[in-house]
Image: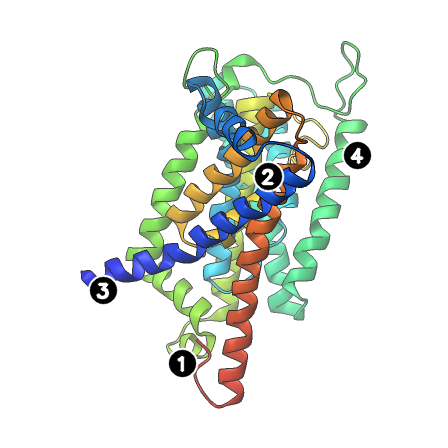
Amino acid sequence: MNRKLTEFAGSLVQPIVAVLLGLLIGALAISLVGGSIMETYAEMWKGAFGSFYFVTNTLSRATPIILVGLGATLAFRAGFFNLGAEGQMILGGLCAAITALYVPGPGWYKLLLALISGIVAGGIWSAFAGWMDAKFRMNLLITTLLLNYIASLFAGYLVAYPLKDTTGSAAMAQTKMIEHSAWLPKLFQGMSLHAGFLIALAGTILLFLFMKYTVSGYETRMLGNNPLFAAYGGVQRGKLMLYSMLASGGFAGLAGAVEVLGTQYRYLDGSLSTPGYAWSGIMATLLAGSHPLGTAFAAILLAALQTGGMGVERNTEVPLEIASVIQATLILFVSAKISYGFLKRRKARAQGGSMV
């Protein structure tokens, strides 16, 4: 018991140090632009958690970040880098919008099918990259990145031409508005937080239980920690990679679906890529060391930095980009740790030691 607590406390040290260093670098940046450090951080806190309204705004923004982060967590724990979350999220959101618009039936039925179609679209797009890796040895980093552009341009074409909303001003590339009965319900009257947040929390708990207590979860962790040992134990890398990528993309597709069904109520070109949800989700995963529960907390932290940064820009002379500086610093220190771990394993392997 004590050993587990010690290990858990030890795992928190690196993210906490990264956050503190990020705030320190942010303080230096604030000083350089002539702002007050204490006033700026106070406004940032108020903008993120200063009232119930701002808290719900922060949790609403964290919802797609949590879901994307969970997908990245699953892929990373299996030892694969899924950097295509943005494209998977876009296709998930687009398919959810199309399903809700054109499938006949009552609202709850459309909503359910729209969520499922988002998961399926994101999962298939991600598994496609995994299939190319398994079949043709195409680098997963490259294919998932390039598939982002294909998904974004394809979705942009569809909503700019065949699916474009031609009613009203019709100035923007977007689909028609989804009928109200197929929207995700709001959790509080007059607030932006919707039921997608509960879906994200349920996904976090389910993924944690899957990774911790199931045989497939153990095989996934074993493959990520030591591929040679996993192969010796009978784990089929190609098969597990396809399943991992399918589930990883499914989470990203679900993120796009809940954003469309809970916030925008239509697919609007660029609305899922411009806020950087996908990259924030990957950042949350890296910050939490690919732990499902930690990823959810890290996602809320990053969302708070973003909504707090907007509060800073509203109420002070300090620009919004200060929040981006802090986030970039966080990921810089996390990346430094990952690079150090990679070099350490490489050195150990060169000396005939373990790869772990």
Residue 106 visible? The answer is: no
Disc nearest the viewer among 3 and 4: 3
Mark 2: secondary structure: helix
Disc nearest the viewer among 2 and 4: 2
Question: Which class describes the residues within 10 Å of circle 2: few (<14), some (14-19), or many (20+)?
Answer: many
Q: Amino acid at mark 3?
A: Arg
Q: Earlier in the sequence, mark 1 or mark 2?
A: 1
* Residue beneath disc 4: 157
Q: Tell me where residue 126 appears, x and y as whole percent.
A: 59, 52
Report the Cα–Cα distance between label 3 and label 1.
29 Å
Disc nearest the viewer among 1 and 2: 2
- Residue pictured at 41% horizontal, 63% vertical: 220
Residue 68 visible? The answer is: yes
Q: Earlier in the sequence, mark 3 or mark 4?
A: 3
Residue at the extreme bottom: 352
Report the Cα–Cα distance between label 2 and label 4.
21 Å
Mark 1: secondary structure: helix
